[in-house]
Image (cartoon, coloured by chain):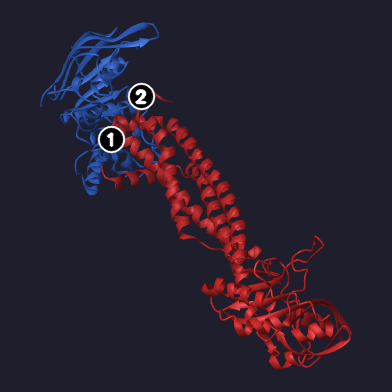
Amino acid sequence: MQPIQLKNICKTFRLGDTKVKALDGVCLDIEPGDFMAVIGASGSGKSTLMNVIGCLDQADSGSYLLEGRPVCELQKHQLADIRNQRIGFVFQGFNLLPRTTALENVMLPLLYYRGELPAAEQRQRATKALQQVGLADRMHHEPNQLSGGQQQRVAIARALVNDPAIILADEPTGNLDSRTTLDVLALFQELNDQGITIVLVTHETDVAEHTRRVIEMQDGKIQRDFKVANRRLALKY
Amino acid sequence: MKWSKWIVVALRSIARNRLRSLLTMLGIIIGVGSVIALVALGEGSQADITGNIAAMGTNLIIVVPESTESHGVRGGAGTSSSLSLADVEVLRKEAKAVRYVSAEVRLSEQVVAGNSNWNTTVQGVDKDFLLIRNYQLAKGGFFGEREVSAKSKVAVLGQTVAKELFADQDPIGQRIRVRKTPFQVIGVLAEKGQSSMGNDQDDIILIPSTTALYRLSDGKTVRSLLASAVSAEKISEAKEQITAELRKAHRLRDGEKDDFDLRDQSEMNSMASQVTGTMTLLLSAIAGVSLLVGGIGIMNIMLVSVTERTREIGIRLAVGARGGDILCQFLIEAVVLCLCGGLIGILSGLGIAFSLGQIMGISVSVNPLMIVVSVGFTLAVGVFFGFYPARKAANLNPIEALRHE
């Protein structure tokens, strides 16, 4: 598998008359199978970096290669297809569809899959993803019948269902208590051990300590980039 | 992507928000329902009126005297007494396109039978009157040529008169008195009900025209002649023959004005359908406005729903929905909502039309074209008013949509 390569990525936002450089010449390689944390103060550009990597947003300049494809040159609908097939998102607020069962939530990305995928196989894939996150017995529950940690695991299953090149998690533990935080981190570590690439945005250093690599953002630049020396293992409760 | 998939997505989304969907549909339901109900009732009453006019008689032509004119003072229609019983004979013999002819002598009389009395219309007519005016006999018989030429004192009662004078008794063979002249009841007419003008067609006594004219009246005033053309197509031919024969019989010279006037049902029909047509048009216009309002209601709710579901749209965009997918979803949702509303509207409209028709005694005529048109219209409303909110949803920025609270 090819790495994710970002070279000289710049992104400027206009706020009235002032220009804010959210990303200022970011260069970053993410190896397949890595588990990386992006930390930094708010406004440091870490969310923008996430959006660019996740193809939700396009850089103003620079180059971004995702599995060899130059993302910066792609059309809007091509970006949508990349998000659909190569990227999994996990959000702070879970972002599950309300009044929709866990299974249907997990099947949502498959709905927008452009190839032939019979309904039976969609169901099978979604069931498998839910098994991976340990929620096979909660398949037919709706989000309001699930705890926060369970909802986040459904969201992770949704990110997994398309067998993505990378899972992007934006503050995935921000809404969780410390116990379920460890639960979710344990799940991420488990998935990472299976070879899934994960990028996790957080502002909590002890969450970052569970990853393999940390980059610290400041003013749209990468300030520090280091391997985690003593990776903490989150044990499931 | 397959359409069936989108319809499933739209249906699920509608099912997830049942109350909101129902409220959205309400405008369309009311709009379509009122269109269907009003048009069904309008067309039904139109058919009623045409039916009533047809029930007045078969291929009926009415001959009335022209107005009088003496020294420049003109009376109203039918004020002259130019028609006579001889005219009946002439038309019966000479006018080939005319099947039946009857004179009509109308008198308003106080009728006495035993202890009861009743004021009613006594009508002097000829033997074919029943056939011309589509009356049926309920009991007994009718008078024939013999009774007419003999000026017999026989009477056939309408249902109302029979009830008023004899209550539960059998009127056949009983005697009644009209202006001191005794009559024998030989028959009772079957019920005919109200005419399109609202008068009771059963409040009537029929006696031979000669009896009415010579025993009860001045022997001159024949109010009108009723003629029945051999077929509907022959009505105009019959009218020409009647005109020619009556001019000859009345010895009118060329260039002299007719001293009589002809009327037939087509004139009444066109007048009545003009009135009811205007009514139907007016009602449809009102219903059309309510459909428009319903459509705007759909757009309103869809716009609100786009705002309310911004986050959902964000999620869908994040997991790989293209703008076009979102557009399709919202458009189909609007169309499905409109169609469901339309179907419910059609059903409830028909229900309302039939129950109102029952209550008010109007017939209901369901025009399939109207149903097709209203379904088509709701479809158009769905697309038209759904498009703007759908495009708005499709153009949302996924990042901002996800951040939306």
Q: Quadrant of the N terminus of chain B?
A: top left
Q: Position of residue B139 (x, y in %)?
A: 69, 89
Please tell me whether mark 2 or mark 1 is closer to you in this view: 1
Q: Quadrant of residue B385?
A: top left
Give the residue pinned by disc 2: A178
| Chain A: drawing colour | blue
Give the Cα distance between marks 2 and 1.
Answer: 23 Å
* Residue displayed at 73% across by 91% down: B149
For label 1, count other residues whose C-alpha is less than 10 Å away and answer few (under 14), some (14-19) or many (20+): many
Tell whether label 1 touches label 2 (CB within 8 Å).
no
Question: Percent position (x, y) of residue A93?
Answer: 37, 27
Residue sitting at x 32%, y 16% = A204
Residue B13 visible, this orientation: no
Sequence-first disc among 2 and 1? 1
- The type of residue carrying mark 1 is Arg
Chain B shown in which color?
red
A61 or A26, which lies in front?
A: A61
Instruction: Locate residue B41: give its quadrant.
Output: bottom right
- x and y, in percent, of residue B348 in the image: 53, 56
Viewed as shown, does residue A120 lie left or right of B122? left
**Is residue B326 at least partly visible in the picture?**
yes
Instruction: Tell me residue B97's x, y (percent).
Output: 56, 79
Query: What residue type is disc 2 on?
Result: Ser
**Which residue: 23% across, 27% down?**
A79
Mark seen at residue A158: 1
